[in-house]
């Protein structure tokens, strides 16, 4: 079944690195093989074919002027994948690596992630190949305004609610919201991740990272009767997810010794100085991590070129638990072997699909607890839904309330995933557990809504 669907998607190989959409579909379908055969309605309603086909892909030209009045053109996209469970929901990514294939993969992952939250949200993803690096604040504003001029007809509080992702934080969401309001005169929750000053939810910036750690805490407690206190943890990335994962890990008493950016890795055996990391990576600044060692000479900086075989320095440092929080396909088989060799007991994904399929296989075989991003990083989109809820009722919730609800939701996701894995005879396989649990909710809605 997996092969025939992949063939239809124009792909005969099971997994190639430069086709992340096929990689994501392949992983999900492999998990679902038995489930699909267990109920004839899936075939009758062509659920799999419908599930792997996006509802629509919107592509547009974004033209904007830089500070010297030079004209630039970028591609803009929104992939609205599935709205069976609720309005399309998912982030916007601004990064030169953005292509239709990448956004299709992210939107496909999003429908499963959003289903796992149990909340009424469908799945979408969008963005642009625009590179925010080195752009002035005004250039960012002009780009965001130009992007929204093209996107606005396709979104709405009950239609499609974009949010942030790589390269898109509350500053960008603010500019996008401002332009949407100019054009439509409609002041509603059309975007989430807004600044708190006008409709944003408290804790949205922290939500993904905190959620990752809440999930990890629950998983370690239930599976190994372990805590994170005084445990050495490694984190990759230096963006919003990584920073808040590090923050929550430190609050729980863990010692986080790494972080990384696209140029290299910092290893600080005394524990990452979060205030310094924040200072270096502040939205407007985005300095290289190499600057870290200027004030912390005891720390080690390794440029990315160090491992030409595809390995990543972060995963070669011994740890109790590892948190890939940078981007897709950043943890290879070589890295997984190193982690297993060094006695790592848990890998908890903060990014979307950062671990390669053969690396996941190794973790599962070796009994390393492995949580896929669609389960452990769902806290971000969940708090986005809390923001939609606050906007719709014109309410503002306290920080503690959002935090409590997030913690509770992450524990529920863990329970859903682990119980499903048990029920389907693949105990502790949280990849299958997540895919099956998400699929069951989603497919039920698709069947009930008809074709
Ligand atoms: N981009 C985030 C994700 O990957 C958040 C999406 C949202 O808040 O809608 O889930």
Image (tube, rainbow, N blue to C red):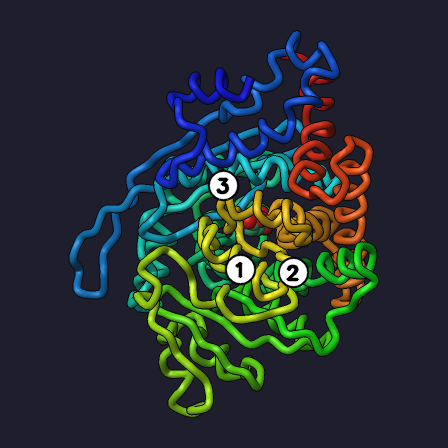
Q: Is residue 153 left or right of residue 342?
A: left
Is residue 58 shown to the viewer in this render? yes
* Precedes in sequence: disc 3 or disc 1: 3
| Circle 2 SS class | helix
Q: Quadrant of the C terminus?
A: top right
What residue do we see at 42% from left, 82% from top? Answer: 300
For mark 1, what is the residue? 325
Is residue 188 shown to the viewer in this render? no
For mark 3, what is the residue? 106
* Precedes in sequence: disc 3 or disc 2: 3
Q: Is mark 3 within 8 Å of ligand 1?
A: yes
The answer to whether residue 266 is above or below residue 359 is below
Query: In this orientation, which residue lies closer to the viewer: 88 or 429?
Result: 429
Which one is closest to the eye, mark 3 or mark 1?
Answer: 1
What residue do we see at 58% from left, 32% from top? Answer: 28
For mark 2, what is the residue? 207
What residue do we see at 81% from left, 46% from top? Answer: 415
Which one is closest to the eye, mark 3 or mark 2?
Answer: 3
The answer to whether residue 220 is above or below residue 436 is below
Labels in figure, total: 3
Query: In this orientation, which residue lies closer to the viewer: 433 or 89?
Result: 433
Q: Is disc 1 in contact with disc 2, using a CB cutoff of under 8 Å?
A: no
Q: Residue 324's quadrant in the figure?
A: bottom right
- Crowding near pointer 2: few (<14 within 10 Å), some, many (20+)? many
- Crowding near pointer 1: few (<14 within 10 Å), some, many (20+)? many
Query: In this orientation, which residue lies closer to the viewer: 272 or 185?
Result: 272
Query: In this orientation, which residue lies closer to the viewer: 391 or 291?
Result: 291
Residue 121 placed where, x, y %?
A: 66, 38
Q: Is disc 3 in contact with disc 1, using a CB cutoff of under 8 Å?
A: no
Q: Quadrant of the N terminus?
A: top right
């Amino acid at each position: 079944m997996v092969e025939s669907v992949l063939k239809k998607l124009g792909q005969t190989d099971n997994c190639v690195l430069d086709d992340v959409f096929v990689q994501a579909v392949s992983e999900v379908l492999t998990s679902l093989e038995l489930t699909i055969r267990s109920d004839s309605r899936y075939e009758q309603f062509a659920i799999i074919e419908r599930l792997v086909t996006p509802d629509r892909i919107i592509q547009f030209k974004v033209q904007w002027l830089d500070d010297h009045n030079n004209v630039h053109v970028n591609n803009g996209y929104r992939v609205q994948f599935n709205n069976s469970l609720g309005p399309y929901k998912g982030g916007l990514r601004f990064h030169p690596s953005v292509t239709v294939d990448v956004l299709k993969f992210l939107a496909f992952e999003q429908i499963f992630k959003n289903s796992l939250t149990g909340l009424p949200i469908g799945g979408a993803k969008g963005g642009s190949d625009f590179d925010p690096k080195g752009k002035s604040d005004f250039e960012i504003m002009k780009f965001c305004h130009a992007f929204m001029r093209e996107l606005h007809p396709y979104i709405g509080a009950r239609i499609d609610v974009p949010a942030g992702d790589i390269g898109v934080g509350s500053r960008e969401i603010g500019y996008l919201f401002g332009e949407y309001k100019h054009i439509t005169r409609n002041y509603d929750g059309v975007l989430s991740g807004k600044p708190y000053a006008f409709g944003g939810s408290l804790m949205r910036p922290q939500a993904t990272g905190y959620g990752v750690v809440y999930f990890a805490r629950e998983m370690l407690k239930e599976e190994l009767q372990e805590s994170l206190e005084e445990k050495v943890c490694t984190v990759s990335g230096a963006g919003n997810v990584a920073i808040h994962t590090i923050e929550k890990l430190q609050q729980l008493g863990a010692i986080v010794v790494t972080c990384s950016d696209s140029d290299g890795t910092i290893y600080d055996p005394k524990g990452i100085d979060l205030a310094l990391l924040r200072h270096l990576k502040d939205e407007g600044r985005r300095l290289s991590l190499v600057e870290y060692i200027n004030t912390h000479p005891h720390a080690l900086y390794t440029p990315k070129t160090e491992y030409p075989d595809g390995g990543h320095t972060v995963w070669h440092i011994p740890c109790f638990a590892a948190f890939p929080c940078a981007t897709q396909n950043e943890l290879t088989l070589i890295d997984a072997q190193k982690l297993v060799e060094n006695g790592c007991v848990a890998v908890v994904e903060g990014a979307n699909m950062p671990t390669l399929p053969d690396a996941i296989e190794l973790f599962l075989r070796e009994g390393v607890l492995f949580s896929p991003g669609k389960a452990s990083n769902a806290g971000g989109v969940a708090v986005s839904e809390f923001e939609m809820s606050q906007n719709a009722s014109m309410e503002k919730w306290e920080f503690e309330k959002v935090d409590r609800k997030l913690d509770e939701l992450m524990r529920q996701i863990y329970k859903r995933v682990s119980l499903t894995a048990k029920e389907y005879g693949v105990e502790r396989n949280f990849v299958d557990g997540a895919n099956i649990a998400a699929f069951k909710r989603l497919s039920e809605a698709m069947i009930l809504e008809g074709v």
